[in-house]
């Protein structure tokens, strides 16, 4: 019999486990974002080392062409350059992995927020509480109604129509509905056949 307004809180479920899941998802997102910052630093270091290895290799190569350094020194410079390039590419690949992990963590936060929102039931429209199917402390289960709301002054009447009369019925047609129990006639409109 209580009158409710659209958006009014009607029931709240125990959401402690959902809040904990949401906090875990947020922590996972924060951890992934911190890893991205760390990865960006690693890329900067790897890039600097690669640039140094390239410059060193160019100098050694110039000297090698003049036969001023040994084959061993040239090979070591070339190996350091290859290693620096590999480290740089590995750091960039790690950044892509971390970005993927951030996207996954963001989706986990969104999913946890959706689940948390299910713990609060709000009135979808202005109306009257017609029936309460559960009491405080009862176990709520998916698909089982907690409350039934009735929209004030908006009723839907469903009735069979004989096949021989289907030609006279169409959507939008105004009709008069007689309610003998109330000794009343109500104007209505056909909305669905």
Image (spheres, grey):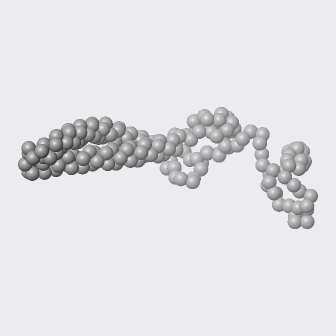
Based on the displayed image, in which of its 4 quarters is residue 84 positioned?
Answer: top left
146 in relation to 37, above or below: below
Position of residue 85 measured from the top left corner of the image (x, y, whole percent): 24, 47
Pick the front one: 105 or 39: 39
Pick the front one: 88 or 58: 58
Pick the front one: 143 or 174: 174
The residue at the point 65 percent across, 46 percent down is: 148
Position of residue 61 measured from the top left corner of the image (x, y, whole percent): 16, 45
- Visible in this render: residue 111? yes
Query: As drawn, is 136 to the left or to the right of 90?
Result: right
The residue at the point 83 percent across, 60 percent down is: 160
Based on the displayed image, in which of its 4 quarters is residue 99 positioned?
Answer: top left
Q: Quadrant of the N terminus?
A: top right
169 in relation to 84, above or below: below
Pick the front one: 71 or 40: 71
The residue at the point 8 percent across, 44 percent down is: 68
Position of residue 60 measured from the top left corner of the image (x, y, whole percent): 14, 43
Position of residue 77 measured from the top left corner of the image (x, y, whole percent): 14, 46
The residue at the point 13 percent across, 51 percent down is: 75
139 in relation to 16, above or below: below
- Visible in this render: residue 119? no
Query: As drawn, is 70 to the left or to the right of 42?
Result: left
């Amino acid at each position: 019999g209580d009158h409710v307004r659209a958006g009014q809180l009607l029931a709240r479920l125990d959401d402690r486990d959902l809040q904990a899941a949401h906090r875990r998802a947020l922590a996972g997102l924060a951890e992934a974002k911190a890893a991205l910052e760390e990865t960006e630093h690693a890329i900067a270091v790897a890039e600097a080392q690669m640039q140094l290895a390239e410059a060193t290799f160019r100098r050694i190569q110039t000297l090698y062409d003049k036969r001023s350094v040994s084959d061993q020194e040239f090979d070591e410079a070339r190996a350091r350059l290859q290693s620096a390039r590999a480290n740089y590419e590995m750091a960039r690949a790690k950044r892509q992995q971390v970005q993927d992990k951030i996207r996954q963590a963001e989706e986990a936060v969104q999913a946890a927020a959706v689940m948390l929102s299910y713990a609060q039931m709000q009135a979808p429209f202005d109306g009257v509480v017609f029936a309460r199917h559960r009491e405080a402390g009862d176990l709520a289960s998916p698909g089982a109604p907690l409350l039934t709301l009735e929209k004030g002054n908006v009723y839907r009447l469903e009735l069979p129509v004989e096949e021989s009369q289907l030609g006279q019925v169409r959507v939008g047609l105004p009709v008069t509905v007689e309610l003998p129990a109330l000794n009343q006639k109500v104007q209505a409109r056909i909305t669905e056949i």
